[in-house]
Amino acid sequence: MSTPTKLFEPYKLGPITLPNRFVMAPLTRNRAVEGFVPGPLAAEYYGQRASAGLLITEASQISQQGQGYQDTPGIYSKEQVAGWRKVTDRVHELGGRIFIQLWHVGRISHTSLQVNNGAPVAPSAIRAKGKTFVGGTFADVSEPRALALEEIPGIIESFRLATANALAAGFDGVEVHGANGYLLDQFAKDGANKRTDAYGGSIENRAKLMLEVSKVVAAEAGADRTGIRISPVTPANDISDSNPQPLFDYIVDHLNALKLTYIHVIEGATGGPRDIAPFDYGSLRKRFKGAYIANNGYDFDLATKVLAADQADLIAFGKPFISNPDLVERLKRGAPLNEYDKNTFYGGGAKGYTDYPALGAALDAAQ
Ligand code: 8OZ
């Protein structure tokens, strides 16, 4: 007999009741318009997916310095706030709930995206082996410069301002992007952080920026409306750490003390193998009293199993939500899923964005 699934049971996430355990993972789509404002189709795209228990937006830069790819939306200007307001209004009209993911890419950027074509910033002046997408093509990321100690309060303040903007735009909460080799992950992990000041060296020092940012964001939005995404062992964007278990045990203990509403954990290599390196995710689950959102390669069976074993409270699905706006309904009915088209993930218009059919539409089209 198959295990009954908890996927369709409600869950209380702080002050917000989610009607099911589905989270739409943050997904970069590169369709922002002039001024890095969410594009004209963004409200429709997120609205189509409003049946998810919780939507998390694509990563959105907190400042121009925090941008690393072309046409990603920001959350630092009035125009961007107005653009996002259309998205949150649409999602709320349709009965949904939506958090925004706050992003600073650090060294995963290109001079062409930076103020006055300057160098991207990083904990240390070490160039990542990796590519970004700029000017319609893939390019090596640029050589970064190490942030001066005096610049760090400004980064934290940008996260705070972005949070205030997110609330003004009508978001139900915010997710700090602490994952995938971007700025906060770069500070945390010793492959990218060779600093000798208060933000480098020991686990405590390397974790400091991620925790300071989480603290100010939570003070602004409320801890019960603040989550964070982490990826302890991912090699994404050339990131590495020599000993991730004690590092993330320490980080999660301190996130717990801040009473964040969730940790959103990418288990394994982002978008790749789950078993890339040994890591005890159960240790994070035990340490953190808020919700545990599990992510990476989940399908119905694995989600059902992990929820039944109480190893997670919520499951974040990425690519399945790109091609299935009604993923919740499809899995409830055991209906087939639409295949996704990788060629339309990043950039472009409605194709591969707002034109994936929901079940009803698919049935209508077949007649
Ligand atoms: C894919 C392409 C560009 C950025 C992440 C924000 O990995 C991203 C991202 C993913 O977190």
Image (cartoon, rainbow, N blue to C red):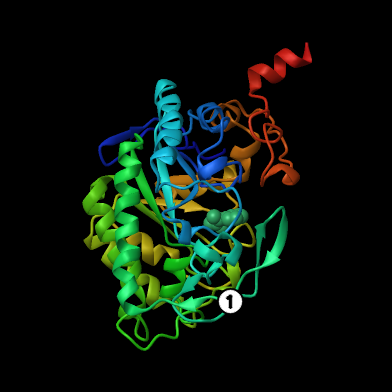
Quarter of the N terminus within the rendering: top right
The relative height of residue 302 versus residue 130 in the rendered view (above or below) is above
Quadrant hosting residue 166? top left
Provide residue 249's location: percent of width, then percent of height: 35, 71
Determine the residue located farthest toward the bottom in the rendered image. 196
Quadrant of ligand 1: it is bottom right
Furthest toward the right, the residue is: 367
> Residue at (49%, 65%) from the top-left corner?
182
Q: Residue at x 48, y 43 (%)?
A: 57
On screen, 155 above or below 76? below
Label 1 crowd bin: few (<14), some (14–19), many (20+), radius 10 Å: some
Front residue of 50 and 115: 115
* Residue ranking furthest to the front: 116
Q: Amino acid at mark 1?
A: Glu
Which residue is under mark 1? 143
Say which of 336 and 91 sits in front.
91
Classify the position of the C terminus by image quarter: top right
Residue 191 vs residue 281, the one in the foreground? 191
Q: Is residue 317 visible?
A: yes
Going by the picture, which residue comes out furthest to the top? 367
- Quarter where residue 323 is shown: top right
The x, y position of residue 353, in whole percent, is 65, 35
